[in-house]
Amino acid sequence: MDEIRETQEPQKQSGFGGRSILTLLACLFVFIALSGNGAVTPALNAMKTGLWSDIPATTITLISTLPSLTAIAGCLVTGAIAGKYLSWRATSVLSFAFYIGFGVVPAIVNMQDFYATLVMRAGFGLGMGMLWPLGNALVLRLYQDAKQGVVLGWGQTIQSVGGTIMQILGGALAAIQPQYCYYAYLIAALGLILSLAGIPKLPLEKPEKKEKVKIPGSAWAFIILLFLGMMFVMPILAGTSTIMAERNFGGSAFAGIVTSCYTIGGAVAGLVFGFTFKKMGKWIVPAGYILMAVSMFIVAYASSAPMLAFGLFFAAFNFVQIRPAVYSLVGASVTPAQMASMIGITTAMFNLGTFLATYYMKACNAIFLGGADSVVFPIICSGVLYAVMAIIVAIVFFVKKSKFEAKSE
């Protein structure tokens, strides 16, 4: 047989949205693993002083940043194979296997060589990248209408909580020994088990060779919107500690507390996304971007630490309203066979926006300040650009009234 077909699982009446509780947990657990880089962040200084004192600190940060690059390839892999050439369950299990295997190896073998560790981190990033689009794509494939928005929102909250869990675990383990931080990735073993038990059998949806369905331009437009949105939000995360120091708001420890308000804002946004998306639908996107502009200006001109904390909270709240809405709109714009590919591309572009944010900030300062080093000016630029994006999207939505719709009711 050159094509394996899996039988459609009948809809269950118990559980949530016609799916079992195990299915819901399997989908949500994917989101916990998406913040895996947080496990190594608390250990970077210990690695510098205890393992690789002869290596520049900026080079050691590759331990944290390299997975974001290889994750882009992982996103595209999942988009190419999930639900078409490999079942959703098998793709999930394979992704978790890469994530756990490459993630934990440096701890198991007590890896001392920096470049060997980087190879393991590249493999880990591939696994993490394969998981990135999987969570959203599974929700879009398994849940319908309002339940879809609710589960997407929960996923965003779980992702924020997962980042906190990974940071706490990584920091506690690194306090014993720097390499032990990688043991935090063993939490993903539960995700692998849930994938086997909870992801139902679904038919493969290989695209017909004779029929080429064109991907609508609207799907690509939403992908670009999310890419730009991610790139424009990064200056407030990169610049918070500097702003606090320059304005005498507090030291590094207090900066960590203030920055955590961004995580809290994202978690709260995920909890209410199902309700807001049901009420607003596609209009969450332009409304979210105009409020993102307000958030940027609050952060840029904050006169106190509480005001800065509120700006970060408000930015995360609005951005996490936009992100799952874009995933839902992209999913509604394409065929089931195209969904995994488009969600994979969307997530890859999201990661690319994170990576390119450094160059965006440098470009803002180079073009408008002659290269002067400023953390505030890129934030102001982002505020202006968010407002422009909101206006453009709103105009397009008014002109194309029925084109951009997702199942939010």
Image (spheres, grey):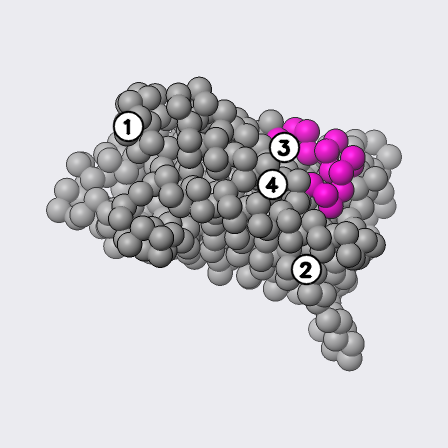
Give the side of residue 205 with respect to residue 243, left or right.
right
Which residue position is annotated with label 1?
A: 245
Q: Nearer the viewer, residue 378 or 42?
A: 378
Q: Residues within 10 Å of mark 3 (few under 14, many from 20)?
A: many
Q: Is residue 395 visible?
A: yes
**First in residue order: circle 4 vs circle 1:** 1
Residue 219 is marked as 2
Give the side of residue 279 with respect to residue 222, left or right.
right
Q: Nearer the viewer, residue 283 or 266?
A: 283
Q: Amino acid at mark 1?
A: Ala
Which residue position is annotated with label 4?
A: 290
Residue 126, position in %: x, y? 46, 55
The reply to whether dot 3 and dot 1 touch (C-beta < 8 Å) is no
Which residue position is annotated with label 3?
A: 270
Instruction: Characterize the magenta stretch by its predominant secondary structure.
Output: helix
The reply to whether dot 2 and dot 4 touch (C-beta < 8 Å) is no
Rendered position, 159 above or below 231: above
Q: Residues within 10 Å of mark 2 (few under 14, many from 20)?
A: many
**First in residue order: circle 4 vs circle 3:** 3
Q: Amino acid at mark 4?
A: Ile
Q: Amino acid at mark 2?
A: Ala
Residue 240, position in %: x, y? 37, 33
| Range shown magenta | 269-284
Q: CA distance from mark 2 to mark 4?
A: 21 Å
**First in residue order: circle 2 vs circle 1:** 2
Q: Nearer the viewer, residue 17 or 250?
A: 250
Q: Residue at 55% across / 61% down in the picture?
A: 76
Q: Residue at 72% across / 43% down in the picture?
A: 283
